[in-house]
Every structure is written in C-alpha cells, then in structure tokens.
Image (cartoon, rainbow, N blue to C red):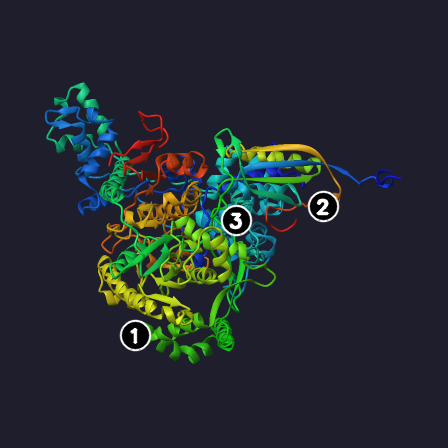
Amino acid sequence: MTMKQNALPLPLHRRRKIEIVMRAEDRTMVEDLLRAAGVSGWTMIRDVAGMGHHGFHQGRTIFNDESGLVMFVGVGDEAVIADVAGGLSRLFESRPGVTFLSDVEVMRSDYFSPARSTPRGPSL
Amino acid sequence: MNMIAPIERTGERLGRTEVAGLVALAARTVAPLWPLESAIAVNPLARFEELPFAQAVAEASKLFGARRTLPLALWRRLYENDRIDEAALRDAAIAHLGGIYHAAAPIAPGVTMLDALMACLLAIEPGDQPERKDGLGPDAAFIAKWCGAFFDHGMTTMPLPYRDLGLYRAVLAMAAYDPDYRTLTGARGAALLLSVPRDPLEAISEGLASLEVPVDELAYLSGLVARLPGWAGHIRWRTDHADPDRVADVPATMADLAALWILLARADAVSALPPAPSAGKDRRAALLAHFGLTAKALDARNAERLDAVARVDDDALGALFMTAAERSYANGLMPALQRAARTSNPPLRPDAQLVLCIDVRSEPFRRALEAEGNYETFGYAGFFGLPIALHPFAGAHRARLLPVLLSPRHDISERPVPGRESEAEAIADGARRDACTSDLFAAAKVGPATAFAAAEATGPLAAALMLARTFAPLAASRAAATLRKRRQLALAPAPEGYANHTGVSLADKVGYASALFRLTGMRPDTARLVVLTGHGASAVNNPYAAALDCGACSGHAGGSNARLLAAMLNDADVRSGMAEEGLKLPPTTYFLAAEHNTTTDEVTIFDADSIPDTHAADLAALSASLARAAGANRARRARSLDRAPGDLLTGAVHWGEVRPEWGLAGNAAFIVGPRDLTRAIDLQGRAFLHSYDWRADRDGSALATILTAPMVVAQWINCQYLFSTIDNERYGSGDKVTHNVIGGIGVVQGNGGDLKIGLPRQSLFRDNGLPHHVPQRLLAIVHAPFDRVAALVETSDILRRLFGKGWVQLIVIDPETARARRWREDGADCGEGRNLLCVDC
C-alpha cells in the first residue's frame, strides 16, 4: 500500500491572486486600496529588483525603505480582487507599476474572506 | 414631496476602491507634517518632484496660493550684501536670453538686451506685491476649527464626542449644532447632513457624481486637500508615519478630510481660490526712461527686443537671482575643492578620532577641534546607522531614533546602568510625580470650583519662577541640568529588546559596527580613542525645539544612538566578528559616545567613568581640546547672530529667546568625500559633510547608500529652508511672536486656522528683514570616478529624478584627475552623449 492511496483529498478553494509591483514610496497607497476593497491580509516583499521600461531597478537599499520597488501579493474572492484592480487602474494613471492577476487554489479559505473597512479607519 | 427621493440627481458613481485610489493620490499633494515633539524637515513640494523644478514651483504656486520666489526687493538686498556675484548674475541673464550672441543684440546704440535685462534685475522699480488676505475663508476656517477640536491631543477638558467614529462622522454628528455650518450652507447643508453617506469614500463618490460640471476627479480632490495643507499634512503623518498606538483612539484618513470638503461643495459653500500671487508689470516705459530712449527712436526689430526683456516678470527675475546665487556659491567652492583633490596627504595616526553627524552645524565645530590638535574627524548620518526605536525608562511612548525614510527594526529599551538601579528608580519616581503634579495643576486651573483657589495657591510660586527664568535664566536652569546629568549617568540604551521584542543580534551588531567603516571609509587602524558624537540643541519655550535636534534621529538628540554603537564597538564578540570581515581594530582602541549641543557648543561625554585607566589621559586631553573648540565656535556663531558669545549660553535657557541658534539656515552643499578634500576650506557651516573613500567602496554600494538616504534627507532640509524663505506665510510658519501651539501637534497663527507647515521667520530672516538663509538648491559634490556615479544615478529612480529634474545639482570630482563635471538636467542642451558635462565653474 502506498502513501498516495491513503492520502485524503486536499480541501482546496479557488480564489484570485493579485501581484502588484510598485515603487516603495507608493506602498501606502496600495495598502489603502487593499483595505478599501476588503482584502483581509497581504504579503509585501521589499527590495524587488528587475528590468523595466526605464532600465534595471536596483533591489538592495539600506537606510531608505522608500527607495526601490516593492511587491504586494494578495488573495481574495474574484469580486474583491477585481475591485482592487479597478482602484489600481487609477493609481497607474500617474504612478509607475505593474500588476498580475491569476487563479489560485488555497487551503484555508477563511484566511482570504473579505474584511470590509475604510482605509485605516473604523469598521462600518 | 417624495420623501425617499435623493436631494439631487447623481451621475455614474465611482466604486469605493476607485475613490480610495484617487484619495491616496490626492493625499500626496501635501507633505506629511510631524508633530512638534519630533519636527522633521520635509520638502513641502515633495509631490511635485516628478516635475522639473521650475514647473513644480509654478504648479504648487497655483495650488497653494504661494509665491514662486523671494520678492525682487529682497533679492536685490542680498545682491547688495555680496551674497550674489555680479558675474554669476550676468551669466544667468545671458543664459536666459539664449546665449551671448542674443544677449549682445543691440536695442539702441550702446544698449544691449543684456543691459536691459540687468537693469530689470537691479535698477527698475519692481512690480507691486499683490495684497494678501489674512486668514482663511469661512469654508476652510470651518474645517480647520473642527480639525482642531478633533485632534486635540488630550489637551481639552471636554473632548469632542464620537471621535472613535472618525473625523468625518464626528463632524457630521456635530455640524447641525454649529452656527458657522448653518451660515455657510443654509437649508441645503442641513438636508445634506441627514442624507449623505456615513462612509467617507461613498460620500466622496456620491459627491463627485453630483457635481454639475464634469471635473478631473484627481485634480479636484487634490485641490481640496491642498486648501488646508497643515491639517492634511497632519493626517498624512497619522496614516503613513505614526505608531498605531499614538493615533488609534482618534482615527482619521484623508478620505475623512476630503469628504468634509465634498459636503461643503455640495452645499455650494466652497469659496473660489484667490489667484496665485505674482508681481509683474510691463517694464517697457521704465526701461525707455532708464536708458533715456524714446519709443519712436526704436525700429521694429529693436522694439521687439525691448519688449522681450520688458515682459520678463518678477518671478522670472527671481529665478535668475536664485541661479546666480547657486553659481556664486559653486564658483567660490569648486576651485578650492579641486585644489585639495590634486594634493594627497599621507595618513597619520591621530591622537583621537571623532565621528560627527553630517549636519551643517558639525562642520565648523570639526574645523575648530582639528585646529586644537592631532584629531581626525568624520561625517556620518547622526543615527549612526542604527534603525532603532527607544522606549524610555518609565516613559509612555517610544521615540523613533532613525530617519523617517526607515522603519525601526529594533525596539530597544533604556535601562539602568548596572549598579545604579536605585538611582534610576528614584529618577523615574520623580518623573512620574512631576507628571502627576502637572496633570493635577492642569485640572485644577480649569475646574470651575478650583480655578481661583489654584491661582491663589500657586500664583506666588509661579511668579517667583517667572522672575527667576526671566532675570536669572542660567541659575534657574541648573536644576534641570543636574537632573539631565543624573539621568545620563543612571540610564543607558541597551541592545536587549524592549518587552517581547527581540534585541539586536550579534550578527546585526557586527553589521552596524562594520557599516561605520564601510560607509565613511574610516580605516581599521583606528586611534586609541574614537568618539561617536551625536548632537542635540537647547531651547526653552520653543515649539520648534525639535527642529534644532538631529534630523537623522527624527528630531531627537543623537546621544542614545552614539552610546549604543560605542557599546557595540567595545564588545569583544563584535570586534571578533568585524575581524572576520577584514576589519581588525587595534586592541588599544576604545570607543566613547558624546553629544554636541549645537546651541551652546558644549560636548557631553557619556559613560566617561567606564573608560579604562590606560585611556584616561587621552580623554583628559581631548576634553580640554573640546572645551577650547567650543569657545572658538561659539565666538564664530555669536558674530553671525550679532551677539556676545556668552549670550548664546543664556539664550539656550531663556524662555523669551526666539533665535537660540541659526539651525541649518544657510545650508547649500552636500559633500561626499574624504576630509582631506575639505579640511583646508572654511565652509562656513553651509555644507553637509559625509565622509567617503571611493577606494574602499569597490562595488559602489556605500555611495549608493549615501546618495539615496543621507542626501535625500539633506535635500528635504534644503527644500524646507528654501520654500520657507521664499514664502514664509504659505510654506513657512510666519512670525513666532503670534504663534499658538495647538494640541502639541503644531502651531497656528493667532487663535486658529490651519497648522503652519514650515519654519518660523526668525529661523530664516535677520531682524532687519534680510534673509539669513539664501534660498538656493542643494549642490551635491561627490568625490568618486565619473563612471561609478553615472551608473548609480542611471539605475536609481530617486537620483534620476532629483538630479534630472533640477531639485539637486550634482558635481562629480574625479579622484584621479581632479577634473569636475556637472550632471546635466533633463532637456538641457548637451553636445555630448553622457549626462556628466565638463563643469563650467
């Protein structure tokens, strides 16, 4: 008997994922959007390096959290992530950045349920 | 009447998150405004840094109703006082006219276009300065009033109700009872109070949709935010920079503020913006009279040339003066720096080395100390590379002791020095007792039943204290100085973590200790004594006291950071770790911490009793030199303040002192290089000095750190001084005499209104009205290979923007040849392909 035959099927739930790469100095604007849309949590990766339209972006920064690029990763219901993307389109009108949307499966769906709130304000 | 009909028709509405995006962008229109306890210099035009400098100034002028330059009359006074060279002004005028060929074009026999433009700059009567209305319009005054009530910082006896609901909803709840609101908005406003959404984002969305004329939503919201830059800046501090525990009980976002403006807009209660002030006039007649010409005598071509010059307005003339001031400064400095770059001095082992903050006030002190003996000094960011927040012993809130560009990575605590625990407890008990007494007095003096009794009981004591502080301020300050000394002896910052925070690991300690050497180019063959010297200032009854402290420590004194790094550098394990990285320090080297008081020039040595006996004589000699250097620097500073040297000691403790020191006024340059480059030059306290050795920085990472962090902080400081000077009412905070502190978070002029966002007049102007600070952009001078600097700038968004858009001017000195090149601003004429041009100064 193999382990595979004994394993229970994983309880997976389909969600949408959004990845946003923006300047570190703009990170609070993205956080405002995520909160306004009701994304209950996200990951932020500092010092993202890479090649873009304006050449190579250095990743490593010390003594300045506002320089370089950051990447946000958020997961949520399709409507919530679409809402975030709608808000981002406004930011991208004047701020540089890119975003990627994709389908993902998560194990703990309660971690990604919407939390409706105003940006850094009290719950309504 | 249909009771469920909306009170006005609304168009297609934006989604809530879309509005959040717009508000987030609009919020950037204003710079964050730190509270007084940690006043941080910021560029009030930070939002416009994507634009070329001149365009940014023009756009901000429209938005904030601010001047674009100093009034022409003040520029002329600076010129008459030899702060601007005639040759530099003439060069700026020639460049404005399109080059020497156009500048030499005749208008009449013996009169060129350059002559005419110089006459406009120096002789022709300037245009009238448009009159400004004092105070805010009724709409802005209404919102400012409620902001003041909402953000009272616990100062009022009766706090505003419903504050936990947020600014917008709290004001909605109270506005119906406010006669100012009724007067402003009438019946329409009353109806709106009942019907508008309670969520600020939805209220903004509904409000934008209800506007009769379609608008650019972002420009519209930005315009609203900019109407009260002080309160909006305070909200930006709360949302982007404050510790959550400081602001959680009074929640407010920029959406709250924008929603209040939208509420007034829907009631047609928002007033029109006054036009941006711009003094201009047609100087044609005045030019003709100045040169004794008549219009008829000019042919068409010459008349056109005259008109071209006559149309140059006061703002453009002011910009020429600023360019000339910048060139005058660079022309005076660069030959001396290039001379120094051509000579090399063999390294000698000094008797002691001191590392001071890059602050412009350190430079003259370093120079004075170097004159006293065989001392070597270095410039390093005054937080000494430690990203810490310090929890004071028995204190309520942590202090962020790092640049605002960084978030704290270590929460550390102030702890009793071993063996002094009981003394530390006694000090803490005393502080708690003083706080309780203060609270009791504050409650008693406003209580209806206790006000008179409190005045009767404490009046004589208060009068005695007042007389002592007025007529014998030095004696009155002794008790506070003694307590400060006791505290320094009994308590010290410890690298262990505060509460459940992890402390500073050995690897981190080695990293921070090594960074000092890596970033400054300090050699590992250190002197017997190395003193890390932070700085702070002394000022009494001065809301802007924190602005005189260390900017790299978020407006706090830098002694704690110096003590912590000195302790790390004396740690045997850290020394071993550094040795493994190739930094083997002599075992005879001992590190000490100190703090330079920039108001009195006294230097306090910390933990001096812990120094080994073997180094006692070194310290005694250094202490004597520091005292003599303090006297020399005090005498120099006293001359610039038109006072006697002893007056500076009195001013530091006198409650009526409005100008205890000049702070960073005069700042003009940021020089990155070894001390040998600047040691022989009197930089007059106008230069930030960051030590750097290009040879020790093979991959350029140290230079990248210096330019993207300390230089950015220096640029913020420079821009704050620049804009506070050119329009002290809009970008500064006006006259100190009429300041009122509001809620401990800022000052207002008179009895209310918007928080003032910049520096007071007394910090920038002399008593005779002449600017002490010449408004000019920062000149960054880097001693490093051209290619290294060019590669760095081209891969950094921040540097491309600051140098390319003209916010900072960059000159690079090649260490091998001592040739200098200037960075070309975007769009500037360039015959070469590279961005670094041969310097023309």
Q: What is the distance, in whole Å, between disc 3 and disc 2 at their CAs?
A: 25 Å
Can residue B655 be seen at all in this image of the molecule? no
User: What chain does badge 3 belong to?
Assistant: B
Residue of label 3: B240
Numbered mark located on residue A59 in the image:
none
SS of the residue at dot 1?
loop
Circle 3 sits in a helix, a strand or a loop, which is it?
helix
Badge 1: residue crowd in 10 Å (few <14, some 14–19, many ≥20): some
Which numbered tag is attached to residue A111? 2
Q: Residue at x 39, y 74 (%)?
A: B482
In this picture, residue B741 sits left or right of residue B618: right
Quadrant placement of the N terminus of chain B: top right
Instruction: Return the chain for callout 1.
Output: B
- Where is residue B717? Give x, y as percent: 37, 49
Label 1 and label 2 in one chain: no
Is residue B420 depicted above or below B247 in this figure?
A: below
Name the N-terminal-most of marks 3 and 1.
3
Query: Residue B472, which numbered label?
Result: 1
Q: Amino acid at mark 2?
A: Tyr
Work out how far the residue at label 3 is from the one at label 1, CA to CA, in angstroms.
44 Å
Decide: marks 1, 2 in contact (CB < 8 A)?
A: no
Q: Where does the image place residue A72, in percent across and percent down from the top left?
A: 60, 40
Image marks 3 and 2: residues in contact by CB distance under 8 Å? no
Question: Are the residues flagged by discs 3 and 1 from a single subunit?
Answer: yes
Q: Amino acid at mark 1?
A: Ala
Rendered view: B318 above or below B607: above
